[in-house]
Amino acid sequence: MSLLDLCSYLGLAATGLVTLNLLMGMLISLRYSPVRHWPHRHINLFALHQWTAYGVLVFMLTHPAVLLLLDAPRFRVVDLLWPTHSPLQPKINLAGAGALDLLVLVIGTSLLRLRMPRRVWRSLHYLVYPSAILLFLHSILTDPLLKDGHPDLLDGGKIFVEICALLILAASALRYRLRGRGL
């Protein structure tokens, strides 16, 4: 496995965990109870939601860090911190960096949620949706080979990301339809 493959797999893991985390967050917001509903077990959905968010953060931080180890194209730390200077696909990389920045803001405010008004925390927590959109755009439009910038949208990894995006879109529409009622 090459460093480029490792970078791609870390990005795919982050995308999968983001999807899982968003789905769990929607279940929590709908007052889903795993005891009353399937699987009829005591599962701390809130703790699982928190830990998958931390996992997403770890994968999203290590994904670009692997690029520093590549010989060609050469990425520098400044390219990761300010992606408009990156050697390849700067706008698409900026979308990925924006997704990471929004996620850090959401996780940071979640750690402080008991010290802030619920309405403020909830408004900031909705930033996960623009973060997910930026993440999906970055994941779908990035050339995984870092060559010509033309991604193969029917590649296995891209299809995985597209399925995750469709799942979130469908779940968001259902969540919007059930607003105020819950499960």
Image: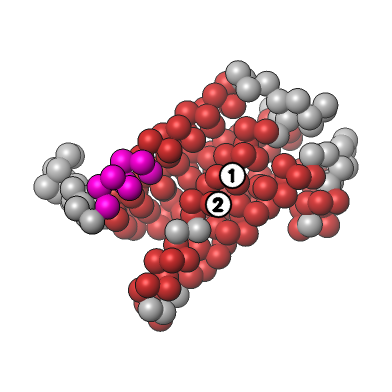
Identify whether 34 is placed above or below 142. below
| Residue occupying the point 53% across, 40% down | 15
Determine if residue 6 is in view.
no
Circle number at residue 135:
1
Magenta stretch secondary structure, dominant: helix
| Residue occupying the point 72% across, 42% down | 92
Where residue 130 appears, as percent x and y from the top left, is: 54, 52
| Residue occupying the point 81% across, 51% down | 84
Element at label 1: helix
CA gap, disc 1 and disc 2: 6 Å
| Residue occupying the point 82% across, 26% down | 148
Where residue 49 appears, as percent x and y from the top left, is: 37, 53
Boundaries of the magenta span: 172-179
Which amino acid type is shown beneath numbered disc 1? Leu
Q: What residue is shown with label 2?
A: 131
Please state if 126 lies on the left or on the right of 105 as rendered: left
